[in-house]
Amino acid sequence: MRAAAIGIGSNSLRMLVADMKDAQLHRVLRDREGLRVFAALDEHGDISMDMILQACRSVGAMAEKARAIGAEEVFLFATSAVRDAQNQLEFSQSLFQATGLKLDICTGEREAKLSFLGSTGAQRSGMIDIGGGSTEIVIGEEKTIEFADSLQMGAVRLYRWMPIGNAEDAHAVARKAAEILQPRKNEILALTQPKEWVGVGGTFTTAAACAQNVHWNDREHIHGYSISREQVERMMEQMADMPLEKRVTLPGVQAQRADIIVHGFAILLCCMDELKIAQITVSENGNLEGYLKLKFLP
């Protein structure tokens, strides 16, 4: 069975086409576009009409690409930005009319569980998924979840709240993230701490790429790389002091992510400090894999 999952995130539109066989998921194709739905929320919390039209075009093109390589089913889901939107019904209806796909808008807890299921294995683990609009934290073992929550501290969200012009500003954003994490911090620390933490999302893959000075799309070196708290702080401070024009020249940084990456690093530094995480293993897998696993695998 070949199927596709298309996820509308706060910062990007992503697709995974995979074969489900022998009780495993086998990747066929990944695709990505920088859509930035969260940035298109206006002062009333509505997704702009321009973004609705762009999303319809982009989702339609991805779905066509998936079907062209044999996907029998195509699923469409959305996370934080659409979940926050006041006009999410209009957004969903527009997508259905344009593409024929029914939009599944995930709750924060479900979003967290999908990323956990997609990125972790059989052993008990912790997971952090830093997105554009929110950050998900989960502790558990396979489908047995001990803690799962989605916090309103995504990289694009904090970028809109607090600009960063230097290292001091970056540390201020990390402190703001710590305030958002505070109500759940003690509950997380009260659990037996997992031996391994896994990191999901563009902040983590960028951190792994920059730490090794490799290209942001070098999956061989990025997936499975273990990054330390000290590396995160050093990269955060260095990039905070860089003008945007210099950041975009770094091989490990996607041009579309260059303006928000320091905010992502600040969130990551906050999580590692507050939850006492010395190092975290980067995964390229996430909620797309989790969505298809939940649909098809036992």
Image: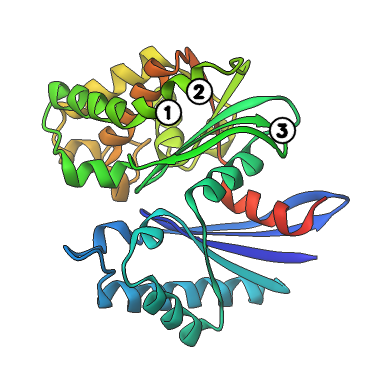
The disc at residue 155 is none
Callout 2 amino acid: Ile
Q: What element carries label 2?
A: helix
C-alpha gap between disc 2 and disc 3: 20 Å
Mark 2 Cα shell of 10 Å, populated few (<14), some (14-19), many (≥20):
some
**Quadrant showing the N terminus:** bottom right
Q: What residue would you read off at disc 3?
A: 121
Mark 1 to mark 3 CA distance (whole Å): 25 Å
Which residue matches tag 2?
188
Position of residue 190 measured from the top left corner of the image (x, y, whole percent): 53, 16
| Left or right: 101, with 79 as reference point | right
Tags 1 and 2 touching, CB below 8 Å = yes
Which label belongs to residue 184? 1
Q: Which is nearer the N-term, disc 1 or disc 3? A: 3
Q: Which quadrant of the structure image shows residue 67?
A: bottom right
Q: Is residue 14 left or right of residue 271?
A: right
Is 121 above or below relative to 157? above
Q: Residue at x 63, y 15 (%)?
A: 195
* Frontmost residue, 177 versus 6: 177
Question: How busy is the neighbourhood of tag 3: few (under 14 within 10 Å), some, or many (20 plus)?
Answer: few
Left or right: residue 264 compared with residue 57: left
